[in-house]
Amino acid sequence: MEQVMEQKCTACGAPLRFDPEKGKLVCDACGAVQAIPEELQIGDVDLDGFDFNAMTSHATDENAEDLPVYNCVSCGAEVIAPREQIATTCPYCGNNIVLTDKVAGKLRPDALIPFRIDKKQLPAAVNNFYKGKALLPKNFFSDNAMGKVTGVYVPFWMFSGHIGGVLRFRGETISTFRQGDYRVTQTHHYQLVRDADLSFRDVPVDASGRIADSLMDSLEPFDTSDAKPFDMRYLAGFTADRFDREKGDVSDRAQRRMITSAEDAVSSTLNHYGNVRRAGGSLHANLSARYMLLPVYLFSISHGGKDYSFAVNGQTGKVVGELPISKSVSGRYFWTRMGAVAAAFVAAFFVKYMMGA
Amino acid sequence: MKRKICALFLLLALCVPLCVVPAGADALWSEDYYRAFDSSDQLSDAEVESLDESCIEFMKQHRVDIAVLAVTAGDWDRVSGREQAKDYFDECRFGYGENADGFLWIYNVDTEEMKLFCFGAADGMIPQDYIDFAAEKAPEMLADYGLKGVLYGGVGYLSKYLEDQAGDAQQSASGGDSSAERAADGSVLPSWYPASTENFPFFHDEAAPRIVDNADIFTDEEEAAMEARIGEIRRELQRDVVVYTDVTDYGLGHAAMAEDFYDYNGYGYGDEAEGMCLFIDMDPENRGWWASATGSESESLYSEYVANLIDDVLYEYMAAGEYGSGVANWIENIRTLYVKGTPFAPDWYGEGTQFSHDPSSPRVVDDAGLLSEAEVAALTEQAAEIAQARGVDVAVHTMASPVGMNYSEVCEQYYRYMGYGYGDNYDGILLTVLKREGYYAVARITAFGAAADKLTETNKERLCELCEAQTNEHAYYEGMSRWLSQTDHMLRTGRVARSGGYWAVIAAIGSVIGSIFGGVSLGVAKAKMAPPRESRDADAYFDPATSRIRDAGSHFLYTTTTRHYDPPQQKSSGGGSSGRSSYHSSHSGSSGRSHSGSGRRF
């Protein structure tokens, strides 16, 4: 049997959950509020020493009998959890439990950003997201209430470090002047060398293979200054996943993003040269990563027989997701604008004509 | 800027104790760029620095600059030509002294080819066989000492030669012959030229001939007629007009000939010797003319714009060999310039400056000869009917386009001169069709009083368009008749009628603009609904406080030059113009008098 931890109300013994608005644990039964102390025990985290292969060696076998079984501390029921899940709710008694064996030792996250947005705030945030989306089908708002909303702590690798190196460019400046009947253009060619050493801090890369990278990237930015050392009590009432992609597997994405930004920054110093092109040199990355859980709400809306997935940044309330475009609304949108402009144009000329102006 | 402070210290150190480099020597050379440059990146920064110092030492010792450039085969073609090398040398502000004396070694690291370019006083300092020998030695130097050795060798090799030469020169320092003075110029001057121009006593000679035709390009009759006409002008205006022709300019130039002939032969009226002189040089190798204006009034009237207009007309005659007619016409133009302030004004211009009523003036006047008598009569009748019905005067005038004049001012003056307009406000409207040979007709509308109230800018533009659409097809009567009928419509309704086709075009244009707007709006709306995408950069996580980007070198390589033939736009102020005249604004001639003038070749 695997290890679990539960959060119980010290007053009435009912399950506690983390309230994002209060930033504390609350008891829905008796209304008791319990603060999470700042001094938390942080286990020794050796991120570079993760034995990820060992941890996931049997994860490919999806037979139910191979999945770990947990006993709910509250009601004693057996709970089967996916390998990636580290926090869940007992389906029998509703108790919030954390699967402590998945956050112990080397699997223990370095930090997390607690939820700041409450579920109650989500409809307003989603409605705000719909604003300005003029091509949405008319009944998309009314017919499709948000389905089940799940608050998930999504595992991320947060990469920090330096991008450095020497880049060489060829560039030109052009001067033009007149010489008698000739227009003379002189192009001055230069070799330009730039030595760059650029720092990046906490570039997030989704460490869960179960959620689309594009969806998670679109939720950025997360404010890591608000991060807390990992404490299991923040997980109460939410689902949480552990990473299933090692940092070595995703470091390329972080490095690529940093190098793109570094190259843009270097190029911006060459603005007074024209026709600038790379002529050699390269940038090298020196990165480190920490394991962090970031707060995300997930839900989907069904429309026209298709499910549209949405995600909400649990820290900032930013909503992202794919939206359907209505052909009829699009057509109407085009014709009304076209007609209005054409009519205004003709009317302006007619008024001008009538006034003789 | 590379180590300017170091250069300053170096100069001070040399100037104070040794007095080798004179004061102000910091202007003798520039150290903005390294004198050693390696586009192949084989040399370290320290080696480039060291080579640069050797070049500077060379320059201080020999007072001639030197730079060394190692390039790849790809760059070789762009810098190995003399002009390209010179461009590079100049761009880097290399060179010693005023003439930027210096050497430039260029070495191709791929083909091991080496070239020396010498600029300024350095040109000729080194014998060619000596240079060739050094270039041949380059591969050996490369094998023994690498690229650095080749470039050092290039500097050292020249330094050795110059040191040897300096030694030789010292040994024979007492020799040498001084250069002789150049012989005085014995060129011939015209017979009328004074022996001395200093303190020349100016005088006025009323009896001096105003036509001096040494080139014999006028007939006796032409000469007599022009002399008589100039006499009339002098009496009328107290302004001199002189024409002088010759078969040479005696090497003085056309402008000096015109000015000096006028100044030294008693021409001009008043203290400032007001007048104009036209000198025509018939030398087949140097054929041309110069018209010189003397005196403040003449100079003021003979502006560059006016000079070009007059010269354009004169050129047509001169190029056709009609010298007598051309000069006679020039004399008339100069008279008109003095009288009316513009050289091509019609006779009536400036005569009718005040409004007046003259019911007897013809309402259709065809000075340009575009209409038949019947057409004039028909238009007169049509204009009279409109005038009667609308209570405003309606008139049509055709004339040759007045060159160099403001059309609107000319039209307004004609309106007043002819006494058009009804009532106290001189209500009326005048169509002027201006037509010049070889050009399209131009329509101008002048209105006063009640007619001006109806003639908005749009109506004016529309009426002109309607008229010109016909007159440009040489349908002058139809154009003017249409203008009259539309003017009637405007006076009645306040607007000029638009056709159905016009509105169809407006609707079509509106639809196109609307479609573009609708399409762009739709695109923007779709962009707002774009699905989530993976991030491509990490700009939001950039930490500027601990980041730096250093300029590790911005090295000039070479210059490419392209030349496009693109002559300045010529003024099309006259048919068959030869182009713009040369023009000298007010300046002092050899006599000390002030002149302005213009000239052209033919």
Image (cartoon, rainbow, N blue to C red):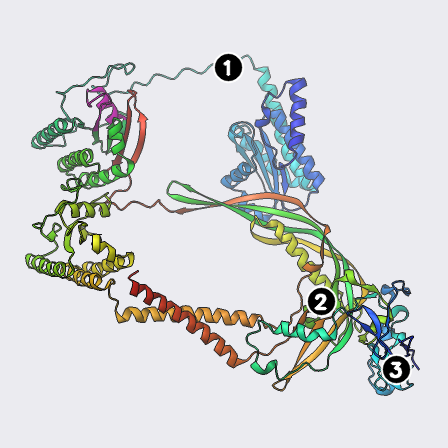
For the residues labelled 1 and 2, say whether their Cβ atoms are less than 8 Å apart.
no
Query: Residue B447: horizontal and vertical position, in percent?
Result: 21, 52
Q: Mark 2 against mark 3, which lies toward the viewer?
A: 2
- The structure residue drawn at horizontal position 52% and vertical position 80%, both measured from the top left corner, is A327
Query: Can the viewer see residue A51?
Result: no
Residue B527's x, y, as percent? 56, 70
Q: Secondary structure at mark 1?
A: loop
Q: Which residue is mark 3?
A: A68
Residue placed under numbered mark 1 in the picture: B176
Secondary structure type for disc 3: loop
Please give the chain letter of the residue carrying mark 2. A
Q: Residue at x 19, y 38 (%)?
A: B318
Q: Which chain hosts label 1? A: B
The percent position of residue B156, horizontal first and vertical second, equals 65, 31
Going by the numbered disc 2, the residue's amino acid type is: Thr
- In magenta stretch: residue B274: yes
- Give me the C-alpha separation between circle 2 and circle 3: 34 Å
Say whether mark 2 and mark 1 are on the same chain: no
Give the residue number, with chain letter if any, for mark 2. A316
